[in-house]
Every structure is written in C-alpha cells, then in structure tokens.
Image (spheres, helix red, strand yellow):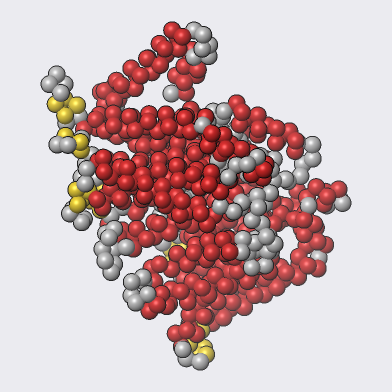
Amino acid sequence: MDIFLQQIINGLVLGSIYALVALGYTMVYGILGLINFAHGEVVMIGALVSYSVMMVLVPSGLPPVLLALISVLVAAPVCMALAWAIERYAYRPLRHAPKLTPLISAIGVSILLQNLAMMIWGRGYHAFPDILPAIHFDIGGAQITLLQTVTIGLAAATMGILAWMIQRTSLGQAMRATAENPAIAELMGIPVNRIITLTFIIGAALAALAGLMVGANYSVAHYYMGFMLGLKAFTAAVLGGIGNITGAMLGGLLLGLIESLGAGYIEDLTGGILGSHYQDIFAFLVLIGVLVFRPGGLMGERVSERA
Amino acid sequence: MKMTARFLARLTRHPADNRVHWLAWLLLGLLLAILPWLVSAGFGNTWLRILNFALLYVMLALGLNIVVGFAGLLDMGYIAFYAVGAYLWALLASPQFGLHWPLWAILPLGAGVAGLFGVLLGAPTLKLRGDYLAIVTLGFGEIIRIFLNNLNAPINITNGPQGISAIDPVHIGSLSLARPIDLGFVQVPSLVSYYYLFLIAALAIIGIAIRLERSRVGRAWAAIREDEVAAKACGINTRNVKLLAFAMGATFGGVAGGLFAGFQQFVSPESFGLLESVMVLCMVVLGGMGHIPGVIFGALLLTILPEFFRHIAGPVQQSLFGTVLIDPENLRMLLFGLSLVLVMRYRPSGLWPSPQRRREIEDVQRADAPADVPVSPM
C-alpha cells in the first residue's frame, strides 16, 4: 500500500512537469498545426541556464529559495527570447510550405540547440544544488518531500493562471480565435502573427519553469535531457487531445502516473522478465494505444482522417 | 557528384541521340568501377570506408523514400528496420548462438522479417494523419532500440548495450570478403570487395525503386500522397497499398542492415538511435522527396560532407587560431542543424526535386500566398 502511494506521489510530480511542457506543445499545435519539435530543447536550456545562475549566486550566501526564484527570473526571459527567435526565423518563413518542411526545420533547430548547449555547458551531467530543505511529510506510510509538494503546487497554480488567462482575458480570446480559424481571426482585427509569437513565448516561460523543476527534483541537468522529456510531454499532449489545454494538463498527470506505477510494478507483473528499465516504453505504448483506439485523445475531437 | 549528374542529365536529354546516351552511362559505370581504387590511392582507407557507408545510406534513403517520398507517409522510426536486419544477421551468423548461416539465407530472411515489422508498424497506424504518424513511428523506433538494449536478461538474446561482436563477415562459399581476394593479377583488398558488393546491392535497389515508381503500385502511392480521399474514390485499396509501402521500405532497410552487420562485424543498440532515423529522413527531404536521383544525391551529400568537415575542421582551426576552439564533432552537428533550417527555408522542396514535386509545392504556396495567415496544406 505504501509503495503504491509512494509511486502515486512520484507520478504526480513527474506528471506536473510533463503537463507544463505539454502545454507548450499543445498551444502551438492548436494554433499552427505544427509539432514544435524544439520545445524539449527549450526546457533543457531553461534548466541549464537556471543551473548556471544558481552556481554563480551560490557563493553570495543567499537563501536557496531566493536563488531558485532569481534563476527562474533569468531563465524564463532567455527561453522566451529563444522561442521568439525560433518562431521568427525557423517557422514563420515556412508557414505556407508543406507540413513536412517545418517539421524538418524544427528537427534542425533541435539539433542546433543541443549542440549549442553542449558547447556552452559541456557533455557532462551537472548536479543541481538543493533548493529547499529536505523536509519530509508522512502520508499514510508514504513520504512526500517539501520540494515535491512545492512542485505540484506551483505547477497547479501556473496551470490555473494559464487556464484563467485563456478563458477570461482578451489575449486568451484572441488565441482561441486564432486556433479556430486564423484567416477569419485576421479579418476580425486580431494581429494573428503577434498572437502566434505570444503563444510561443508563453510556452517557453512554462518550459523554463519546468526545466527548473526537473533540475531540482532529479538534481541533474545535461544537454541531452530535453529530447526524451519533450517526446514524453508531446505524448502527454496527444493523450489528452492535442490542441486542448485542459487535455494537456490531464494527459501530463496521467502519463506521469502511468510511468511511475508501470515502472514500480512491471517487475512483479511480468514475473521478473521485464524490469524498470523498460519505463520509457510505457509512454510510447500509451501513445500508440491512444492513437489507435481514440485518435483524438481523451478530450479532443476525432482527427483520424487526413485533412 | 551533382556536377556529374547535371552533366549526365544534359547528355541524356535527347533520347534520339542514342550514342551519347550510351556513352554517358558507360562513363559513369567505368567511374563507379574504378572509384574505390582511386579513393584508396588518393585519400586512404578511411575514405573508402566512408564511401562504403555512403552506399549503405543510399540504400536506406531509397527505402525510406518509398514510404515518405512515394506514399507520403512520414516515418521517423525507419532505422528500426535497419536494426532488425542488422541484428538478424548478427544473431544468425555469430558465436552469440553458435549459428553461422550463409549470406543467401540470411539476407532474404532479413528482408522478409524487416518487411513483416513494417506491416506490424503500418497496420495500427494506417488511419493516422501525417504528423501523428511521425510521432508513432518515432516511438516504434525507440521501442525497438530499448528492447535491443535490454534483452540481455533474463535470457541473453541481444547482449544488451555491449552489442554483438565477432559477427561473421560477408562470405560467399569459402570466399570471405574480410580478407584480401587474390585474383591472380591483382589483390582486391577487403574494403574494395565490400564496395563492389554494396554497389551491386545499391544498384539493384535503385533499379527496383525506379521500376516501383513507374508501376501500378507506384502510381497508386503517388495518388495517395496527393489526395488520399480521391485515391480511395478512384478504387485504390488504400489500406493494402499503404501497407505495401511500409513493407517495401522496410525490406530495403533490412537488406542494408544485414550488409551493415556483415561489414562492421559488430552491432550495438547505439547505432540505431533516433538521430540515425532523422539523418536518413534528412537525406530524403534535403535531396528531394520522391525523386530517386535527388535522394541518392542527398544520401551521398549527407554522409560525405560531414565526414569531410570532421577531418577539415580541426586542422583549419589549429592554423587559424592556434588551438582547436570548438570540438569538430560538435561543430559538425551544429552546422548540420543550421543547414537543415536554411535548406528548408530557401529550398523547401529539396536540393534536387523532381520537376513534378516542385510544381506541386509551388502551387500550394501560390494558392496561399495572398494573406499572411497560417494554413496547413497537405
């Protein structure tokens, strides 16, 4: 029982991070119909920038919480600028090209960013400093650390603000209109290009936060971390129904839970034939399963036919 | 290479002038026949090895071209079929299980099994739209790699991350390509005999690809690529034809994989990562999707240029700045990423597209041109 609960807690932490990254994918896909392949790398840059900022500030003796706050305040603008540049130079010129073209361009950006990061931060793994004191809370035999609590809480709060913004503000309204039909939105006086740029920038800010969370929770950051994370977050977005904001949050949490429960129990279920190193397979099995049986995802409309 | 091809195209433009046509092909054949000797004499065995890999990549790119270029199905896990072919060879011709099957048994089997995997991947994904398909195939490729990485316990099948070594070299009867072959008047080094084997295989695959493109199935693939609903309305059994595309493409990959295992005599999961899939896809797209000469050009360019760069970047930096500022490997990938973005921006239909494909893309762009609003064609 306590193992079960423990895996649920771990799954929720992982899931909140997936959800934050998945939001970036889903917002861009909802508006442009483009898989922003480079989004995972933006998360990676976010994590590494906040790592560097913390390392620079550690000797100043500031409390670690403040360090984390400053580092995210630096990392978020960096990621936002990066996302702006990616959108402006790699995607916007290709809006009228066939679908494969922006995808290849996105792969190019992804390779570029990875190698840029490798040049700046090197090939090694970087150990993240502890942000919060190691305090545990006991819940029914399982332990949850302060850091995990804060991660889940912060992710929930961020997603709440985003949901409010999209549903209630005029910017959100413009975003929804653009996603619905860009041509008509333009006719209604919505600056479509600016809305698209803003969508990328908002996604990047969430990515920076997610990057810090990954670094803090798994206390490691390296140049290659964005790829798998991005892939899984995309899976989460598809699971929830791509283009659907609530779906991305739900899909992220669900995928986190599936992964951590799966990794925790696969050994018992298969009698020791498959071990927890098959954890990465779950995401893909879930993805294939969802697309085959419910192509629109849990909360999306059906998209099985080619448009 | 491109210059030669252009030159050839000019020579062969008038079918009436048969003599020139014939002469051009003869010249190309001669060039291909003496190329390994020239390369090994002029640049050394490293470059001959690279040339052999270039031929393997030509096969892979042509296989993927069937799926992506002809049928318009975006497959991002294509390297999985290469892995299947390579591992099948590795398991059936190495001390791993003590099996030592001959070439003519493994290669067709490898092609068949890879084709089967192609159908396995294709069947559940037939209904998916382009970019969804991309992600599912990407996941499929990763699943295969993860299994290869972990199938060393509880029963050791793939030997895990260490990979399988001491694989039998390609051999025909008692004639092993791993040793120099004595023809009486000349000694053929191992790398050169592999070159000829790969050249024959690549030419066969080019031939099959050309025949396929012009066949009834090839026309059905083109129809599906242009408009699936219309193709269906014209009476094409889209399900079977798409499955066939997956199977055919995978078969090519399986053959190339088998040859790779025999050539390297070592396979490990590391050779079959996502980056390899992406690389092959880039060869197809950069070269010009669906255009066989373009794809061959793309494959040659993307294997040879980065290697060229790797060998040149270090020394150039050394002489310019006195030290190596940026790791050449790092710089190579950096420029690769950058060139993908730039080529897609300035030549979205590839470096050497087929005239038909270029028209299609220009049509789409013209139709959308007036308003600067995002639309998603295709």
Foreground residue, B289 or B245? B245
Q: Residue at x 61, y 37 (%)?
A: B223
Residue at the far front in the pictured view: B235
Q: Residue at x 61, y 31 (%)?
A: B357
Rendered-image quadrant of the C terminus of chain B: top right
Foreground residue, A100 or A190? A100
Q: Residue at x 76, y 70 (%)?
A: A164
Q: Is residue A306 left or right of residue B117?
A: right
Q: Position of residue B230 (x, y in %)?
A: 67, 41
Q: Is residue A276 left or right of residue B341?
A: left
The answer to whether one can see residue B317 in this image is no
**Residue A72 picture quarter:** bottom right
Q: Position of residue B183 (x, y in %)?
A: 15, 23
Q: Is residue A269 left or right of residue B352?
A: left
Q: Position of residue B340 (x, y in %)?
A: 54, 39
Rendered-image quadrant of the N terminus of chain B: top left
The answer to whether one can see residue A35 in this image is yes
Can you say whether A123 is above or below B39 in the image? below
Can you say whether A231 is above or below B201 in the image? below
Q: Residue at x 57, y 37 (%)?
A: B220
Residue at the far bottom in the pictured view: A140
Residue at the far right in the pictured view: A188
**Residue B351 picture quarter:** top right
Can you say whether B185 is above or below B311 in the image? above
